[in-house]
Image (cartoon, helix red, strand yellow):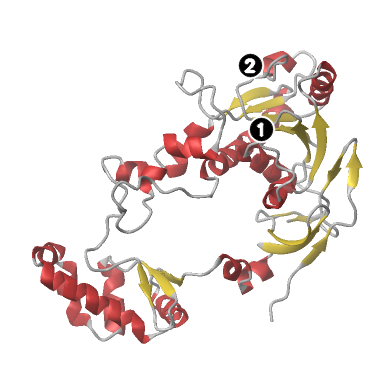
């Protein structure tokens, strides 16, 4: 039986015209406890950064501007990014609203926004603007593109950044893309996540420097540029490719359907994985022909026969049985799970990677837990 860790919101804590998501029984003391952060961003990058800082004890106040083109509070999927935050609605088109926002920033430690500091009409969010009245402020700018880029005025929209940084071109819709179909799209905020993680380390470093020297600073992390390190070695491996197809073994695929109709994802094309696998299925004699890829490609009829024979191997066991076999051999391979199966797995529940919360807006729901854990002599923060 799967047992969930039940963490409930006792009640909404009001903050002017907003509220805070507070998890009952959760230790909110963390390495960033005491720091006040203003989050002024309708895009995922700012929301994710605010969540990461809030998870470690910072007091994050999210500013919901009435002019935002992408309101986030109304969407249950974004309640994860909004957890632990206070909310404040501000009309940044009115002078009173701008004055209120600037007043809050003036008494805070960090301000997060998703444009260049001079983008906003009627006010400036740069460190230079705040340095006299709040010299310790850390200003974090997360624009879509850097200054001087042809798209510097575009927002950090996930689709725009992914298209501009080559992510879609490397993700075809299938093993053999349909001619003329174009790139396939994904729903994961890769760009915003990479930039937010990078920014979280920069914020902590800036706060550490402030403790030593008493001064804040301006941090600028274009979301487009964060993708360079996010894609990492893929930029080197694939930079000369003109297509999005995966380069793989001519016979051995990555996915196979098993006896129970489920699928398994494996990576055994390398000889160091292939040899123990072939020994296990009593076909070590296949090793030489399967590693001679040049010869395999020279005879299409033989190649099709090898593909058929290798596919039939996986029909002898269920996907879960193959997963156990791969684990014993030390070979990368796992059952392709549904999202619910992943979230309800024994590890995710026991480790707290997933939790059940009573959201003050959307009610009882499953959410990812706090992944980073700190421990010291006085308390443990999760």
Residue plotted at (72% across, 63% down): 355
Q: Position of residue 299 (x, y in %)?
A: 9, 67
Q: Quadrant of the C terminus?
A: bottom right
Q: Position of residue 202 (x, y in %)?
A: 61, 34
Q: Upstream in the sequence, badge 1 or badge 2?
A: 1
Is 144 positioned to the left or the right of 325 in the image? Answer: right
Residue 371 falls in which quadrant of the image? bottom right
Secondary structure under tag 1 reads loop
Residue plotted at (47% across, 69% down): 336
Q: Quadrant of the N terminus?
A: bottom right
The residue lying toward the viewer, choosing from 107 and 82, is 82
Q: CA distance from mark 1 to mark 2?
A: 19 Å
The residue lying toward the viewer, choosing from 156 and 370, is 156
Secondary structure under tag 2 reads loop
Whether 365 is drawn above or below 191: the answer is below
Neighbor class of circle 2 (other Cα within 10 Å; few <14, some 14-19, many 20+) is few
Label 1 close to label 2 by CB (< 8 Å): no
- Residue 81 seen in the current view: yes
Q: Position of residue 297 (x, y in %)?
A: 13, 63
Residue with the mark numbered 2? 118
Whether 124 is drawn above or below 172: the answer is above
The residue lying toward the viewer, choosing from 377 and 366, is 366
Residue 267 falls in which quadrant of the image? bottom left
Residue with the mark numbered 1? 69
Whether 352 is drawn above or below 229: the answer is below
């Amino acid at each position: 039986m799967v047992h969930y860790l039940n963490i409930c919101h006792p009640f909404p804590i009001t903050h002017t015209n907003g509220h805070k998501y507070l998890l009952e029984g959760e230790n909110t003391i963390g390495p960033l406890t005491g720091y006040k952060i203003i989050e002024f961003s309708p895009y995922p990058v700012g929301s994710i950064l605010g969540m990461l800082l809030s998870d470690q004890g910072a007091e994050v106040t999210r500013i919901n501007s009435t002019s935002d083109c992408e309101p986030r509070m109304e969407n249950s999927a974004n309640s994860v990014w909004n957890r632990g935050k206070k909310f404040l609605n501000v009309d940044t088109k009115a002078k009173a609203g701008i004055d209120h926002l600037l007043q809050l920033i003036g008494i805070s430690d960090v301000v997060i926004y998703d444009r260049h500091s001079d983008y906003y009409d009627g006010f400036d969010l740069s460190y230079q603007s705040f340095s006299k009245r709040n010299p310790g402020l850390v200003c974090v700018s997360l624009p879509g593109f850097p200054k001087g880029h042809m798209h510097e005025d575009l927002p950090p929209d996930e689709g725009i950044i992914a298209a501009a940084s080559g992510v879609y071109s490397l993700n075809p819709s299938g093993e053999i893309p349909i001619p003329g179909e174009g790139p396939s799209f994904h729903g994961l905020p890769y760009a915003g996540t990479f930039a937010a993680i990078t920014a979280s380390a920069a914020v902590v470093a800036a706060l550490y420097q402030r403790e030593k020297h008493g001064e804040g600073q301006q941090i600028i992390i274009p979301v487009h540029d964060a993708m360079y390190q996010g894609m990492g070695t893929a930029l080197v491996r694939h930079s000369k490719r003109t297509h999005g197809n995966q380069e793989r073994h001519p016979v051995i695929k990555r996915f196979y359907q098993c006896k129970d109709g489920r699928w398994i994802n494996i990576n055994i094309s390398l000889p160091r994985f292939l040899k123990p696998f072939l020994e296990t299925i009593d076909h070590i004699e296949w090793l030489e022909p399967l590693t001679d890829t040049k010869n395999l490609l020279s005879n299409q009829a033989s190649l099709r026969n090898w593909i058929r024979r290798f596919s039939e191997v996986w029909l002898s066991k269920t996907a879960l049985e193959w997963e156990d076999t791969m684990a014993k051999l030390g070979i990368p391979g796992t059952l392709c799970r549904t999202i619910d199966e992943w979230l309800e797995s024994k590890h995710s529940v026991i480790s707290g990677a997933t939790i059940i919360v009573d959201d003050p807006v959307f009610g009882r729901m499953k959410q990812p837990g706090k992944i980073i854990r700190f421990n010291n002599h006085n308390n443990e923060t999760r």
